[in-house]
Image (cartoon, rainbow, N blue to C red):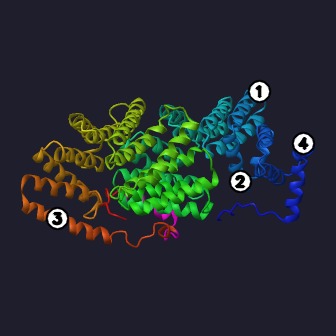
Amino acid sequence: MAAVELEWIPETLYNTAISAVVDNYSRSRRDIRSLPENIQFDVYYKLYQQGQLCQLGGEFCELEVFAKVLRASDKRHLLHHCFQALMDHGVKVASVLANSFSRRCSYIAESDAHVKEKAIQFGFILGGFLSDAGWYCDAEKVFLSCLQLCTLHDEVLHWYRAVECCVRLLHVRNGNCKYHQGEETFKLAQSYMDKLAKHGHQANKAALYGELCALLFAKSHYDEAYSWCIEAMKEITEGLPVKVVVDVLRQASKACVVKREFRKAEQLIKHSVFLAREHFGHKHPKYSDALLDYGFYLLNVDNICQSVAIYQTALDIRQSVFGGKNIHVATAHEDLAYSSYVHQYSSGKFDNALFHAERAIDIITHILPEDHLLLASSKRVKALILEEIAIDCHNKETEERLLQEAYDLHLSSLQLAKKAFGEFNVQTAKHYGNLGRLYQSMRKFKEAEEMHIKAIQIKEQLLGQEDYEVALSVGHLASLYNYDMNQYEDAERLYRRSIAIGKKLFGEGYSGLEYDYRGLIKLYNSVGNYEKVFEYHNVLSNWNRLRDRQFAVADALEDVNTSPQQTQEVVQAFLLAQRYGPTRPCLG
């Protein structure tokens, strides 16, 4: 059943009564707490609407009060508004609640099992809310307290609870880039799974394997992520919570994208988007989660214009739900910044992309430490944009300032990536490649060559000779040799290699081919091979005609409004395809 849209539409008389209670808040405070949870929440929401955030903060910082507010589950959308407003106002309600819950768990350590069970159940609700709202550190503290309670009883029920707790803990650690601790959490969950199996019990592993897939994907361990997404898909059964199904499908889709299994990725992400919209509604954060991964798929199959539209829709949803300085809003800004940068690359109009990149960085630095890994990708995107703006700038002083700022951002991103992932990682290689491009713009050609070669070597070893990421770096090195170092033979060889990979993965209409074709036209002009110049002018013209036809009609959102298949059919089709090897990539 689709979720009811959450809007403030009270009856006039009821609204008048709520306003009267709020007007007499100081005298009515104790009586308000005895009201039914829905009415009590409406009083608090009116406090929020009237800007009485200090009073609202005083209420929400009390664990018993917030526990009751959380029971008004049909008003969760509005609760996020209040909560975020308090956090923006400087009321650290998330950490206050987490600390209060942790203290309560320590107090009841010696209590009866049913008391601890009740606390664990509430901890799942509180931690789940904090996790959904993006306050991962505080959610982690709540789940760790729950896990501690689970370990006090060595019995089947608490083993099940410990597994569930580990899944939730792994999710927040993934969200907060604590990947090493996340791996330890997964191992702990497996140990509880083994205990259950030895006593004849089974826990569904779909959510656990889906979170492991997310962790491995974030670390760029793409082969392992793909293998675990298959295991997660095997665990999807009738009766599994829709949230788990949506998350597994979208994680599996991302794993398929980076393995260039585009047909599988398309089927999985479209069904995930359909399920999220059908079950949660078009204003729900879970729908925005699915949309962001749909945008990722579209960007990677070269449907850039549609990916921008999807990312914008996801951002709009997150801003309407959370608003303010929220980590979920920041990540949506970053995704939109990068897709806008790619979309406007040929036009040179980067104002919109720069706005979103700077907004992402502003939010993240307000919430998290300055050395947090989440800043690496946002800084990288801003640096890419600044470099292009600098290149088109006609003021030498401004150009140098922008290039220096881009350099500082790229260097910071590289250091964060190396600290988190080490030298031998795809993310680190991407940052080397970005520095290579920047050095070229700064006319430091030897340094640029060194960075590009390093990026290619790492990517080839990790991803193989014919991966999209390898083609990008090869094309960048070809451009350096062609435009700035006059190494035309090497440039020609590299351009042809980049073109071959692009055509194989994406077809004749791939957008990245334009830069390789234009590079070859310039190269053949430079060496006086005018027959080849004429040949590649024709190739470029044919490419332009293909691009005009490609994606001309498709509306990515309309495309997922209905699903011709049931979830089990989608799952079985995916698993069946594993028996017959990889599907041919296509531009879905």
Which residue is label 2 attached to? 78
Quarter of the figure with the C terminus? bottom left
Cα distance between the residues tagged 2 and 1 = 32 Å
Q: Which numbered disc, 2 or 1, marks the residue closer to the eye?
A: 2
- Which amino acid type is marked by label 3? His
Residue 539 percent coordinates (x, y): 18, 65
- Which amino acid type is marked by label 2? Leu
Provide the secondary structure element on which disc 1 rests.
helix
Provide the secondary structure element on which disc 2 rests.
helix
Which residue is label 3 attached to? 537
Residue found 42% across the figure and 51% down from its top: 338
Provide the secondary structure element on which disc 3 rests.
helix
Q: Which numbered disc, 1 or 3, marks the residue closer to the eye?
A: 3
Quarter of the figure with the N terminus? bottom right
Which residue is label 4 attached to? 26
Which residue is label 1 attached to? 107
Q: Marks 1 and 2: in contact by CB < 8 Å?
A: no
